[in-house]
Structures are given as C-alpha cells and as structure tokens.
Image (cartoon, rainbow, N blue to C red):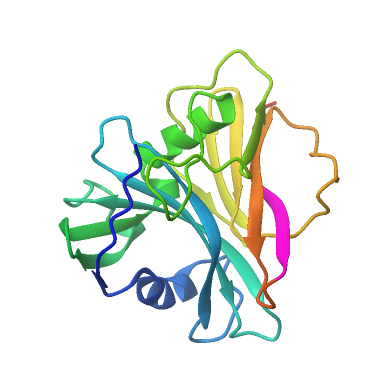
Amino acid sequence: MAVVHRTTLEPSKLDLLTAWLPSRPWYSGGSEPALTKAGGFRLDDPQGEVGIEFMIVNDASGARPVTYLVPLSYRGAPLDGAEHALVGTMEHGVLGRRWAYDGCHDPVPVARLAALIEGRAQAQDQNTSDTPDPEVTRSYVGDGLPADFAAAVDDREGTELTAPGAILRLYRVLRPVPDDAPVPEAAGHVAGPWRRPDGSRARGLFAVLHAAT
C-alpha cells in the first residue's frame, strides 16, 4: 500500500526538482525552473521499502509553459551504482533522511511500471493512502514483459528503456491529446491527466511500450 504521510520535507520536492531539472537533456525552460505541481500518481512497492511517485510539474520559466513527467523513487539509503540518477536528499518528518532518485534509473519503479502496464499493479492516488486512481489508464497486448529493462537513455523528449523484445518509452515532456483520441498502435501504454498552468485539465500519454524489431 502506498502510504502518504502528512508531514514536513526539507527541502521540498519542488526545491529538489528546481535544482535538478536543468541538467536533463529533455529540459527546455529557463536557467532556473519556475515549477508548480500539476498532478501525478503513485505505485506500490510490494516490499514496502521504496516510495514510488510519478510527479507532473508545470514550468513557467521559458518562452512558453512546459509540463514534465518526473518518476521519482524515495529510499532510506543510497542505491548502489545510481549516483548519476540522484535527484537529491531530503529530511522527512516521519521517515528521516530520504534519497530521491530519477525513477527511470531505479529498478523498483521500472518493474512496477511494467506491472502497471500488464495490469498486475494499479495506479494509486498521489495524495491519499490506499486509494486507487481510476483516471490513470493502461493497456497491454502480449504474453508478459521481460523481468529487467536495460539502463535508461535520455533524449530531448523522453527516456527509453530496452529489454529483449521490448522498448519502453517514457514521455518526459507531456503533450495534451483529446480525451477521445485513439492510442497509438503499441503493445501497451499508460496515460493520465494533469492540470495546465491556467487550471484547466489536460490528458496525454505517459509511457508507451513497443515490441522491439
């Protein structure tokens, strides 16, 4: 169960992202992001050790607002070999020091995202414990995803993970699509909503799974 604690964080998640985002190849804003929370969802770690959040933020620092999807994992100790993916550390009022990582480079959130696509996991509300988020949708056509995806590779639009017979692409820069728009032909997908800077609702693809050729 994804437990959401009502407590303090120092620094805040938005503070961590403000310092980290400009280092990403898919960041297109100004020299210092101007971030607001725009939505997202959580996933459960069956072992109860790793917090998993897919956070969506709006950035108003550039010539036009941009919306980013940032998968984050929260750990009680450093993840070996993942120094390059460390977003930062923060002090949690209940859990103590937490190490926040780019979730695309952490095997636990990647595995849970695959489970979500397959239908073996359910998206959870970002702000309320033990509450599914029915607005996050998924699909899958296949016989089961590989157990492990290779190291994530970032580009100007997103992050790509590969495994034998499968390519999983996460969109870091989110693009709104109409609610009734068809999902692109793919082996699987995850989609959901967020809030635009003006407060209106948008919806689009978060991740798409393709069969490798």
Residue 99, position in %: x, y? Answer: 24, 58
Left or right for 132, reference 11? right
So how many labels did they put on this image?
A: 0
Residue found at x 36% / y 44% = 106
The quadrant where residue 39 appears: bottom right
Residue 128, position in %: x, y? Answer: 41, 51
The quadrant where residue 58 appears: bottom right
Q: Is residue 150 in view from this perspective?
A: no
Judging depth in this view, the residue of 169 and 41 nearest the camera is: 41
> In the orientation shown, which residue stands out farthest toward the top?
143
Judging depth in this view, the residue of 171 and 211 nearest the camera is: 171
Residue 133, position in %: x, y? Answer: 54, 43
Left or right for 22, reference 27? left
Q: Is residue 154 in view from this perspective?
A: yes
The quadrant where residue 209 appears: top right
Residue found at x 72% / y 61% = 202
Indicate whether residue 78 is drawn in magenta: no
Indicate whether 103 appears above or below 184. Answer: below
Indicate whether 206 appears above or below 155. Answer: above
The quadrant in which the N terminus is found is top left
Span highlighted in magenta in the image: 200-205
Residue found at x 72% / y 55% = 203
Residue found at x 23% / y 40% = 49
Name the main secondary structure of what is drawn in magenta: strand
Residue 38, position in %: x, y? Answer: 57, 66
Indicate whether 21 appears above or below 118. Answer: below
The quadrant in which the C terminus is found is top right
Judging depth in this view, the residue of 107 and 180 nearest the camera is: 180
